[in-house]
Image: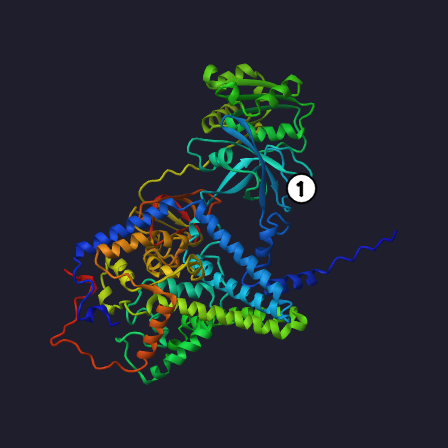
Amino acid sequence: MTVIQKKPVNPIAHLSAEDIEALGAELDAIRDRVIASRGERDARYIRKVISTQRKLEAGSRVVLLFSLFPPAWIVGTAGLAVAKILDNMEIGHNVLHGQWDWMRDPKIHSTSWEWDHVSPADQWKHSHNELHHRYTNVIGKDNDLGYGIMRVDEDQPWHPVHLGQPLWNLLNACFFEYGIAAYDLELGRNLRKGRHKAPEFRARARAVGRKIRRQVLKDYVLHPLLSGPSFLHTLAATFTANLIRNVWSHSVIMCGHFPEGVETFAKTSIEGETRGEWYLRQMLGSANISGSRLLHLMTGNLSFQIEHHLFPDLPSNRYQEIAPEVRALFDRYGLSYTTGSLPRQVFSAWRKVVRLSLPNREKTRPAGDRPAPALASAGA
Amino acid sequence: MTTTAPRPPAPASLRRRILRLAAAVTTPLLPGDYLDLVAPLRSGADLRGRILAVRPETPDAATVVIQPGRDWRGHRPGQYVRLGVDVDGVRQWRAYSVTSAPGRRGDPISITVKAIPDGVVSNHLVRRVRPGAIVQLDQAQGDFVLPGDPPARVLFVTAGSGITPVMGMLRAGALAGADVVLAHSAPTPTDVIFGAELRDLAARGAIRLVERHTDTDGLLGVRQLAELVPDHLDRQTWACGPVGLLDALVEHWATGGQADRLHTERFRPTIITPGEGGTVTFGRSAVTVQADGATPLLDAGEAAGVLMPSGCRMGICFGCVLPLRQGAVRDLRNGALTTAVPGDGVLIQTCVSAPAGACDIDH
């Protein structure tokens, strides 16, 4: 992919400014309809997921107290991995988006929630909700494009360090929660710019340190100690569960914005962006994963990344309900709805990571190629 | 038979250490988050209650029997309890008088609710809620109570659901032997909440009951009261009912020079009438500004120099959320109204909410 404004064929050239605003109005109507119908069914859903997650986590940890016995190790580790995935994806990510704030339950609220993750909720909310969701796929603004360590778009400049990015990506997958914590801290940039002594940065780094300490103490010290003779087995089990959770969430999240078919945008294109144009950027900058209900649950409904990016604060259980309508809008407005199975999208994203570890091959741009107009003035 | 000596209670620091260890094992949750799954009413939990039964009292009123959590500290007759009920998935808080007599620790309590037209919570409690449902509770509060040494001559003036705190007092039995008059208004005899019980009390001579059916007899005013209970100003009086009635009583007792003998309980003291724009108060910052109905609270606060939390400024990141203590706001995206009365602390997104009337923001 390359920023949409430089493509030889601009995928939105056929849309007039009025079309884009009409599209925005149709999406607003979908949003309003869901909000008007939010109610007891949704509340029951999230409470059920939360109580299932807690029972699964508690049960798995109890089973792991006897992890010396191989069946207990396998059952406990699998259960704990699933519990951690549910905690991060369907519960944590979505509660922290404010998807359930409307229930006015102080225990299930974006301002009070904390998750099983080394990045403290408030720091994650800033980098994710405020930066990534606002500047989705804008080169130079949305750090999620390669997390600041990788090149995932032709328009990001190549540097020899990118030769190693398949390896960085693999390591990032294995220790994803630490990668996210460093990312939320903007660790690289702050160190480079010598801001690591600034009191604000130090306070945030201390908060991350405290969170890491608590998570490590629980998973790698207390739980193994409580397991007595099963100490080492439980240690291996919690490490494995964290590894599975990390690789899983990394894979799901890579599928959201990296696969082929997803568009990126130039920094200048979002100046004076209207609501319709913002919606359009979310539509073109995200990709879905097709699959079963279980897959959707385990991805935290990020398998409906397009719907999620259009309406980040709607309850996650509603994304699959509105997906057919959203897809129909894509068809009507002649836009391509990027989706595919999990293996296909993961493969597509990985292939890009590998391909872009090398410099761009010679472009075969048509003579006299000029950048397409900025999104903000598309079709005008 | 052997007896074991009771073990000395664990020192507080040991208990604290155990709790800290338990919290380290359950982080980022608290041990209580897991215990809530199995024992939501246990000691140490947020105060909650389980609805045991809903008994109809009149066509539009019902008594809700609630098993309060272990930390319930009991109530004095006449006090009310704030109840947090999830209606259509949204938690709503309302205050209701406790109508049961104070019992022993662990006894259920009851409240009696009259469904008011368009009342979100009252209709839910009277018509839809089922036994087994969990509600949130606050400890009982309110000073509409009898003194420790009950007076010898008492008058109660009540209307509609205003009978509820008085029923709590009558059932408590503290007025046994006293000269008690109850002047109660309701539209018709069948609308009298606790009608049978009150008439029974009157038949047994425990109270003198003056029942007024306003559909046929007209409203009970001060003049009628003076005719029905000539010595009313000599009695310690507790009154609960519509604002108009209470205002008239307050004026009458003041004119009669007996203001200190009248005790009133006003439900729904705050009526929020949404409008366009309004006065915004940032309580903890001690800043008050005027803002029109198109200005987000975030902008209004910042323009007045309040250090406001903020984020995307377009309603997606929830970085600007603050509690609305009281007032009404309108969502600028879809015009939806959110109102709050004291105690609600509804969290709102300040970047997409404009004042719809006076607002008190807890910041």
Residue A374: % across, % down:
19, 66
The answer to whether any part of residue A291 appears in the image is yes
Give, as a three-letter code, the residue at label 1: Gly
Q: Which residue is mark 1?
A: B106
The residue at the far bottom in this view is A160
Q: Nearer the viewer, residue B185 or B114?
A: B114
Numbered marks: total: 1
The answer to whether any part of residue B207 appears in the image is no
The residue at the far right in this view is B1
Q: Is residue A347 above or below residue A311?
A: below
Residue B244: % across, % down:
45, 26
Q: Could you tell me which residue is drawn at 25 percent across and 59 percent down?
A: A280
* Left or right: A25 as drawn, with respect to B142: left
Q: Nearer the viewer, residue B274 or B121?
A: B121
Q: Is residue B198 above or below residue B49?
A: above
Task: Name the subunit of mark 1.
Answer: B
Residue B265: % across, % down:
53, 32
Label 1 crowd bin: few (<14), some (14–19), many (20+), radius 10 Å: some
